[in-house]
Amino acid sequence: MEAIRLMREEEEAKIKSLAKSSFSFLHGSLVKTTEDTYVYELSEEIVGVVVLETFTFKRNRLGGVVKWLFTEQKARDRGVASALIEHSVKKLQELGCDEMFTTVEGYNTNSSNRFADQGFMPLSAMQQIRRYGFSLLKIGPKTFHTIDIGHFL
């Protein structure tokens, strides 16, 4: 059986272990869960995780960010990441987010394609400055974002 559900507190160690196996050890060590962390369960095993967070920016608008998304190696190319992104978009909309953000490393074209399928798009540095102005100073720390190409907003 497949299901996406909120993470249970006792699953945090499993999620951190999965993060370290999905990314480099150092990168995986940076993963922090939030109250909006969802797991993708397949046959009662966690095979994917998405960590969401909200923040205010630009005159108290609500932004939603997909902070982390990772899957077990064996779950790749099975639609797990796509399902988690679709779920994330719905949840952030339910929370009332005006805009949604994520950061995708430029080399990770599989991930970029999954987010593009859900309507995310990369913005050039000038597009970001025109769209958000000084609010980028609030957006950046929440999204691990710097003004460069390869990051999706």
Image: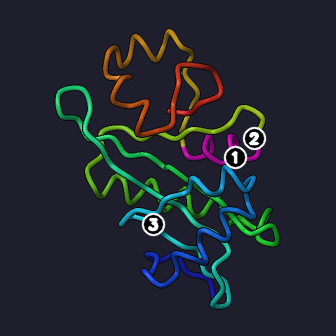
Displayed quadrant of residue 75: bottom right
Q: Is residue 133 left or right of residue 33?
A: left
Counting residues from the N terminus, which is met first, the one under dot 3 or under dot 2?
A: 3
- What are the residue bounds of the magenta stretch? 108-118
Query: What residue do we see at 43% from left, 56% from top?
Result: 52
Label 1 and label 2: CA atoms lie apart by 6 Å
Q: Assess disc 3: are there few (<14), some (14-19) or many (≥20) residues with their C-alpha within 10 Å of its C-alpha.
A: many
Q: Disc number at residue 145?
A: none
Could you say where residue 58 lies in the image, as x and y percent from the top left? 24, 26
Gap in angstroms between the C-alphas marked 3 and 1: 18 Å
Q: Residue at x 25, y 38 (%)?
A: 56
Circles 1 and 2: CB atoms closer than 8 Å: yes
Task: State the residue lying farthest toward the left.
Answer: 59
Q: Circle 3 — which element? A: strand
The figure's colour scheme reads rainbow
Give the labeled residue for mark 1. 111
Residue type at the position of mark 1: Ser
Query: Dot 1: within a 10 Å radius of its alpha carbon, few (fewer than 14), some, or many (20 or more) residues?
Result: some
Is 63 left or right of 78, judged from the image as shown? left
Name the chief secondary structure element in magenta: helix
Residue at the disc numbered 3? 37
What residue is pinned by disc 2?
Answer: 108
Task: Classify 84 as above or below 7.
Answer: above
Q: Amino acid at mark 3?
A: Thr
Q: Position of residue 9 (x, y in %)?
A: 42, 80
Answer whether labels 3 and 1 touch (C-beta < 8 Å): no
Residue 37 % position (x, y)? 45, 66
Which residue lies at the image location 57% right of the left edge and 31% below the top edge? 121
Locate the N terminus and report the quarter of the image it occupies.
Answer: bottom right
Please say whether residue 123 is one of the residues in the magenta stretch.
no
